Image: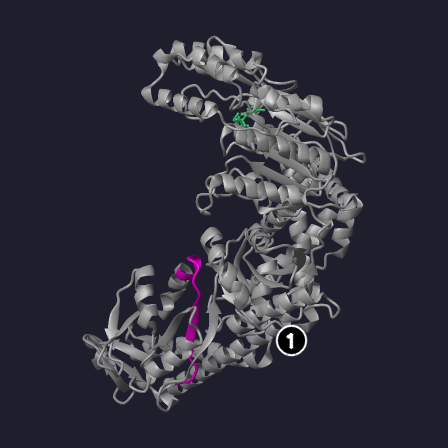
């Protein structure tokens, strides 16, 4: 260390405390990076890598970004999951003895960004903190930009923890170094969530009031961890943090990350974009706050009937009262992002322009209250009553700040006349002085007769009288003092002008610094309103979401659902809201869904592309929509409140996650089977598809039986194993339905209509025929199918509940995909007889022979 120059020593010392961040080291007008930071940053940011002397024989790698354009580079780094520590000069270089003192003033991390450039208007930016003991985990979740803080506790293991973190869309997660060792890498690789270590976990004093004294220890620890991390990274007071709200597990419908993904609630599976998701469909909000609230609602449908009814009633009335709704929308459009403005107030980076937005927002609240009060349902009345339009604050801002202030808060022009006497005096002095100067120009022109004489100003020479060279002779002797000579003019001053200039400049200087001081006072004053502003933000965003529901519901002809008291699903002409929206409404085929305690499981068969998956999701989305308080896509709908929805898809692709698809399928299923209750909805879409036929079929059957016998959850199970339809005769609450398709002029036409019963087994062959596979193949397939159906030991029989010994006879890739149970020679003979040698490839023949031999060995 000693061999380095003092500045590099200082750098290394600071860097050693911020190993996990890029250290932006302020040097004059630049932020410089050194050593490894420099090499990595130059690649990531595509900036030139240079080097400098550092006291040793080797030069030190270095790269830098200008401080005025640093925001962009910080953004790039943070968005790609890195942290940036901003290290500033904290003393005036002129008065510094030796190396200028420097300190890290803020660490910007993916979960703690406050800069509006880095935040998406319609999305929360969540940071999570985790604590755990032998059997439980606690997670607290915070959006630093809005101050929201919520937490909950659950039983589970690390794999569940990871699922939870993903389901919450956390950008960053804070944990102990011990847990970091175990999960950080997985969380980063699989879900691009940045992990950070914070071992301190007692709640620091300034934050005590956010957590109830008798709160559970585990939650307190997670909060403590979060607060320490925020203090460490932000290094400022965080007064906008809201008190911890505890999420009780049975307050909201639980949707795990697989289901959220599979149902495409907030983003689509394929493109990961919002378009095509339920959020996209429902997002007719007019404010960023509303949009964020909607996303939260969709991920947390309610479980309390009264709360759901409240929302549904507002939506109903807003649909009926078109004009009230339109008025409300208009007025809401004038509302700025109050939630984030409150965050900025606390963070200390609010500008005068932001405060004007705050004022304008407050200004539109009385109108919103008035409009809302025209509705007659108790919930919106109550909302209107409780909304505080903060008149006092409004008038305070109105009297203090200019409506169109400059961006900078350090150059004056912020504070209104009449707000502060001293400021007014300076302003008068400056204005009077300028008026005097303007009149001086007139006077000098007429007295000297020089028409082109003018008075100008520049920063270096101040005010001057300018006379062109050709007119110099007209100036009376001794009238002016010479100040500056230009190519074709001379500049002069007079003692009076100099005196006025001094007064003006002095007044302006005082004005600017006084204005800045006054502005800081205004800021401080607004701080005391943070909590009630956050409350107002919540109310406004809620109204925004409810009006959005009304708009979509009317446009898409949704109906008000009824919450079933006896655990019944009765949906007449239901639709999949998103599929319906993206296709022509006329083309969408509505379907009924009936479920009750005697008919709690549906086994759905039908050809590929018939509409099985769509039908299943239709039910899930309809119940999510009801439970967030929106109308639903049907002619008539009655649904129970589902406590959880599980959606599992056979052979889901999770290549990014780096797990085998079948393993993922089974992991997801395990989770569902462990967690589901009688009040849950389970959708199993072709489960078992990810493995070989009999294997998959056996699993599918035992899963269905397990749910039927031990869980009793409402279940829709689609399968391409027609053999499973026999289960209807064995499981009392399971019914077969199928999605129909017909052939029309040699073309397969999907009717998308779901009908009780089971699909035609030979449909696959039929489709193959339409696709004009060689006729020999078709004929052969038909023959084999008949064989299966007549055979005692056919797969259909094998699906019998008691017979669990299923195994492969011939591998799936063998010629005809013939599968039979083992034992008995006659089976071998039978097979030999039916073999069509002319249509077998040599490899097929080898395979067949191999298996035959295995049978008789
Ligand atoms: P499956 O799961 O049976 O293979 P999907 O549910 O994926 O079939 O549906 C395939 C396509 O059929 C969908 O993408 C959609 O365009 C269309 N479709 C499904 N259900 C309907 C319906 N009820 N009305 C109109 N088109 C539908
Ligand atoms: Mg499907």
Image coords of residue 769 (percent x, y): 44, 12
Image coords of residue 737 (percent x, y): 64, 22
| Residue visible at 58% across and 64% down in the picture | 343
Is 475 magenta? The answer is no
- Which residues make up the magenta segment? 77-92
Q: How crowded is mark 1: few (under 14 residues within 10 Å), some or many (20 or more)?
A: few
The residue where tag 1 is placed is: 206
| Residue visible at 65% across and 57% down in the picture | 537
Say which of 189 and 514 sits in front: 189
Q: Using residue 734 as the reference point, say whether residue 185 is left or right of it.
A: left
Q: Is residue 35 above or below residue 150?
A: below
Q: Using residue 323 as the reference point, say whether residue 769 is left or right of it.
A: left
Q: Would you identify the image quadrant in which residue 359 lies?
A: bottom right
Is 85 magenta? The answer is yes
Image coords of residue 316 (percent x, y): 73, 37
Q: Using residue 243 as the reference point, say whether residue 500 is left or right of it.
A: left
Q: In this view, does 613 lie above or below 387?
A: above
Image coords of residue 657 (percent x, y): 46, 47
């Amino acid at each position: 260390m000693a061999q380095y120059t003092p500045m590099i020593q200082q750098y290394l010392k600071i860097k050693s405390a911020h190993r996990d961040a890029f250290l932006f080291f302020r040097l004059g007008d630049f932020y410089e990076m050194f050593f490894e930071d420099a090499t990595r940053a130059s690649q990531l940011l595509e900036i030139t890598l240079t080097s400098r002397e550092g006291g040793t024989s080797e030069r030190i790698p270095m790269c830098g970004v200008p401080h005025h354009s640093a925001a962009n580079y910080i953004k790039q780094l943070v968005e790609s999951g890195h942290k940036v520590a901003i290290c500033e000069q904290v003393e005036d270089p002129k008065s510094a003895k030796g190396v200028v003192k420097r300190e890290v003033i803020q660490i910007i991390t993916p979960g703690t960004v406050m800069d509006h450039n880095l935040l998406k208007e319609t999305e929360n930016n969540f940071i999570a903190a985790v604590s755990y003991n032998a059997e439980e985990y606690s997670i607290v979740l915070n959006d630093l930009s809005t101050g929201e803080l919520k937490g909950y506790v659950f039983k589970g293991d690390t794999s569940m923890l990871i699922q939870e973190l993903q389901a919450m869309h956390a950008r960053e997660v804070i944990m102990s170094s011990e847990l970091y060792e175990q999960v950080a890498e997985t969380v980063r690789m699989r879900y691009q969530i940045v992990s950070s270590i914070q071992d301190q976990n007692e709640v620091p004093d300034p934050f005590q009031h956010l957590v109830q004294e008798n709160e559970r220890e585990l939650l307190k620890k997670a909060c403590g961890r979060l607060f320490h991390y925020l203090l460490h990274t932000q290094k400022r007071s965080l007064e906008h943090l809201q008190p911890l709200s505890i999420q009780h597990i049975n307050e909201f419908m639980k949707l795990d990350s697989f289901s959220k993904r599979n149902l495409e609630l907030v983003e689509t599976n394929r493109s990961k974009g919002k378009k095509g998701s339920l959020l996209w469909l429902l997002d007719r909000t007019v404010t960023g706050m509303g949009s964020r609230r909607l996303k939260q609602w969709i991920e947390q449908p309610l479980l309390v009937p009264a709360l759901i009814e409240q929302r549904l009633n507002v939506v109903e009335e807003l649909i009926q009262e078109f004009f009230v709704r339109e008025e409300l929308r208009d007025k809401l459009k004038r509302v700025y992002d109050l939630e984030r403005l409150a965050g900025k107030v606390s963070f200390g980076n609010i500008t005068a322009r932001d405060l004007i937005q705050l004022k304008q927002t407050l200004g539109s609240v009385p109108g919103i209250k008035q409009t809302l009060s025209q509705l007659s349902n108790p919930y919106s009345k109550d909302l209107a009553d409780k909304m505080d339009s903060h008149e006092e604050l409004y008038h305070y801002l109105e009297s203090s700040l200019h409506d169109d202030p400059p961006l900078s808060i350090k150059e004056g022009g912020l504070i209104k006349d009449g707000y502060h006497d001293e400021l007014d005096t300076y302003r008068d002095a400056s204005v009077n002085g300028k008026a005097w100067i303007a009149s001086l120009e007139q006077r000098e022109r007429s007295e000297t007769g020089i028409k082109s004489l003018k008075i100008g100003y520049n920063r270096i020479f101040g005010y001057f009288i300018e006379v062109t060279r050709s007119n110099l002779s007209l100036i009376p002797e001794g009238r002016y003092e010479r100040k500056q000579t230009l190519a074709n003019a001379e500049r002069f001053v007079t003692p009076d002008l100099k005196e006025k200039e001094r007064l003006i400049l002095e007044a302006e200087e005082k004005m600017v610094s006084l204005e800045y001081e006054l502005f800081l006072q205004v800021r401080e004053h607004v701080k005391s309103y943070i909590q009630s502003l956050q409350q107002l933000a919540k109310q406004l965003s809620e109204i925004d979401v409810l009006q959005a529901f009304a708009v979509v519901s009317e446009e898409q002809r949704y109906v008000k659902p009824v919450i079933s008291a006896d655990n019944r699903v009765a949906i007449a002409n239901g639709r999949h809201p998103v599929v319906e929206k993206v296709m022509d409404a006329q083309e969408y085929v509505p379907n009924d869904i009936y479920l009750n305690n005697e008919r709690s499981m549906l086994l759905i068969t039908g050809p590929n592309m018939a509409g099985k998956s769509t039908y299943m999701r239709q039910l899930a989305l309809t119940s999510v929509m009801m439970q967030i308080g929106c109308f639903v896509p049907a002619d008539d709908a009655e649904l129970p409140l589902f406590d959880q929805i599980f959606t599992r898809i056979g052979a889901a692709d999770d290549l990014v996650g780096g797990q085998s698809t079948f393993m993922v399928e089974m992991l997801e299923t395990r989770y569902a089977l462990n967690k589901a209750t009688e009040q849950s909805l389970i959708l199993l879409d072709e489960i078992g598809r990810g493995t070989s036929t009999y294997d998959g079929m056996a699993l599918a059957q035992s899963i269905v039986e397990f749910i039927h016998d031990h869980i009793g959850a409402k279940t829709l199970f689609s399968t391409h194993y027609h053999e499973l339809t026999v289960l209807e005769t064995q499981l009392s609450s399971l019914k077969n339905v199928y999605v129909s398709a017909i052939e029309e002029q040699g073309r397969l036409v999907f009717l998308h209509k779901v009908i009780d019963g089971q699909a035609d087994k030979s449909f696959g062959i039929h489709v193959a025929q339409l696709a004009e596979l060689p006729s020999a193949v078709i004929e052969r397939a038909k023959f084999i199918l008949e064989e299966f159906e007549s055979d005692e030991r056919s797969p259909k029989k094998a699906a019998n509940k008691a017979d669990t010994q299923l195994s492969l006879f011939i591998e799936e890739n063998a010629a005809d995909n013939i599968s039979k149970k083992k034992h008995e020679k006659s089976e071998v003979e039978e097979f030999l007889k039916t073999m069509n040698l002319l249509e077998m490839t040599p490899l097929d023949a080898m395979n067949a022979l191999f298996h035959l031999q295995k049978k008789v060995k």
